[in-house]
Amino acid sequence: MAEGQIIKALSGFYYVLSEGNVFQCRGRGVFRKQKVTPLVGDRVVFTATSETEGYILDIRERQNELVRPPIANVEQAILVFSAVSPDFSAKLLDRFLVLIESKEIAPIIVISKMDLLDGEAKDAIARYAGDYRRIGYEVIETSAVTKDGLDKLAAHLRGRVSVVAGQSGVGKSSLLNALRPDLRLKTGDISTHLGRGKHTTRHVELLEVAGGLVADTPGFSALEFDDIELDELPRYFPEFREYGEGCKFRGCLHVAEPKCAVREAAEAGDIPPYRYDHYLSFVAEMKGRKPRY
Ligand code: GDP
Ligand code: ZN
């Protein structure tokens, strides 16, 4: 018996990576018994029947489970935002951060295409990077052209399972190619993402990159807050937690309540005012959505 992790599922086979080798495995009815469908990312116990084949005996309990892409045990999301082209959007970044925080996945913020910046535009990005670092997020400035920041990114990928997230065209495929040139993921074409065409059957695969595993399909492509309740939202702004202790009311939503320490901190500039503005607009968006049954 050995342990491994499913890196690909195709035509009834599960490809299990174990100590550098991949075993093509069948399930042997264990899943029907456990009433779970194995997912890419699952940690499994298996028996090898040859040097390349085996069967899965057991699935370890999952830490988490994403639906899009369908993948288990994701530890972190590499959130790629370009400094320009497309322009950096703190509001879109905050939206992604909320979604990632709500799944209890650790976000790593990558600001890509830094080679295209200079002068004031570069200073503006540096200010944003500083703000997000103060909140507690890891921020890595990169360029797939000059290779700046790639070592740092590689160090974060090592030994972990990651999804890459971010708009089309921000340079996700280019970064992975720069870290592992033989991947040859397609770049630059809006209709493809991480090398997968729109009409290809959707299956997800974990790629070995920089000593870690990275999903070949971008995560968090649906950007609605459908799975989040309004009263949870403040939790997903980490810098609110500390100030929130000082609010007059328990369960303060930090909108119009009297003696709200979060609003005061935003007014004083202790919380970046744009973060608070984005929070308010997310609250409004969630209040405006149709009731769910
Ligand atoms: P994806 O859709 O997020 O996977 O983005 P791609 O990797 O396909 O990149 C989109 C476009 O941006 C391509 O034309 C790339 O050549 C370009 N690009 C990506 N990374 C960089 C970078 O670091 N610097 C510059 N100058 N261009 C980049
Ligand atoms: Zn408050």
Image (cartoon, rainbow, N blue to C red):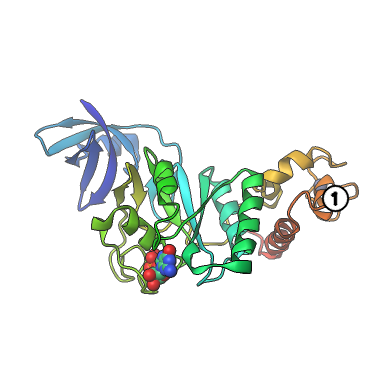
Q: Can see residue 225? A: no
* The residue at label 1 has a CB less than 8 Å from ligand 2: no
Residue 263: give x, y in percent of width and height.
82, 52
Count of numbered labels shown in the rendering: 1
Q: Can see residue 274? A: yes
Quadrant location, the N terminus: top left
- Please give the residue where the numbered disc 1 appears in the rendered image: 264
Which residue, as the protein is rendered here, is positioned at the far right? 258
Q: Is residue 80 above or below residue 189?
A: above
> Camera-side residue: 199 or 116?
116
Ligand 1 - quadrant of the structure image: bottom left
Residue 219: give x, y in percent of width and height.
44, 56
Which residue, as the protein is rendered here, is positioned at the far front? 119
> Camera-side residue: 23 or 148?
148
Residue 91: give x, y in percent of width and height.
63, 63
Q: Residue at x 59, y 46 (%)?
A: 137
**Left or right: residue 99 compared with residue 14:** right
Q: Is residue 1 above or below residue 42?
A: above
**Left or right: residue 169 compared with residue 269:** left
| Secondary structure beneath label 1 | helix
- Mark 1 burial class by Cα count in 10 Å: few <14, some 14-19, many 20+: some
Q: Residue at x 66, y 52 (%)?
A: 131
Residue 165: give x, y in percent of width and height.
46, 57
Q: Is residue 103 above or below residue 292?
A: above
Which residue, as the protein is rendered here, is positioned at the far left? 50
Three-letter code, disc 1: Glu
Q: Residue at x 28, y 45 (%)?
A: 7
Quadrant location, the C terminus: bottom right
**Left or right: residue 119 compared with residue 273:** left
